[in-house]
Image (spheres, grey):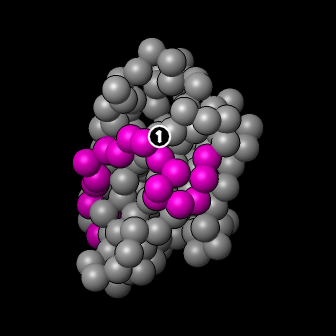
Amino acid sequence: QVQLVESGGGLVQAGGSLRLSCAASVRTFGTYAMGWFRQAPGKEREFVAGIGWSGAATYYADSVKGRFTISRDNAKNTVYLQMNSLKPEDTAVYYCTAVRSVVPTTTPRGYDYWGQGTQVTVSS
């Protein structure tokens, strides 16, 4: 069983930055691909970014490419999402996900473990 705990959400003005963190309680963190999804009110959950178990492979949704950066520190069992140039349309609950795989997927069904989510609100 893997437990994921997100932190770092909050309220920020458009153009600002936030850094989300996700701490995983598993000894074999380095064998899990990790992802970030988000869900806005009335919308489906959507893929934001994913990272392979070594950190070498990263994937982004087109809507965040060039603004968001996913990274991981396997020594700290933590994955990060650095969000820059935030827009009001980035407002959502952000979820950390994990799957025991070399590379991440872009579909929610591809992940076995989910965090409780952290709210990100971007004001205009």
Q: Position of residue 74 (x, y in %)?
A: 55, 24
Q: Closer to the camera, 91 or 106?
A: 106
| Residue 109 image point, x, y percent | 47, 56
User: For the image shown, how many numbered marks are present on the structure?
Assistant: 1
Which residue is most to the front? Answer: 109
How many C-alpha atoms fall within 10 Å of the one at disc 1: few (<14), some, or many (≥20)? Answer: many
Task: Write the residue at 61% across / 67% down.
Answer: 61
Nearer to the camera, 50 or 90: 50
Q: Quadrant of the N terminus?
A: top left
Above or below, 102 relative to 110: above
Which x, y percent locates residue 56?
Answer: 74, 38
Q: Which residue is mark 1?
A: 98
Q: Residue at x 32, y 74 (%)?
A: 40
Q: Nearer the viewer, residue 47 or 84?
A: 47
Residue 116 part of the magenta segment: yes
Disc 1 is placed on an element classified as strand
As drawn, 24 above or below 66: above
In magenta stretch: residue 121:
yes
Q: Which amino acid type corresponds to the residue marked 1 in the rendered image?
A: Ala
- Looking at the image, is 44 positioned above or below residue 56? below
* Span highlighted in magenta in the image: 104-122
Q: What's the residue at 63%, 61% (across, down)?
A: 60
In the rendered image, residue 81, in percent from the top left (x then y), is placed at 49, 50
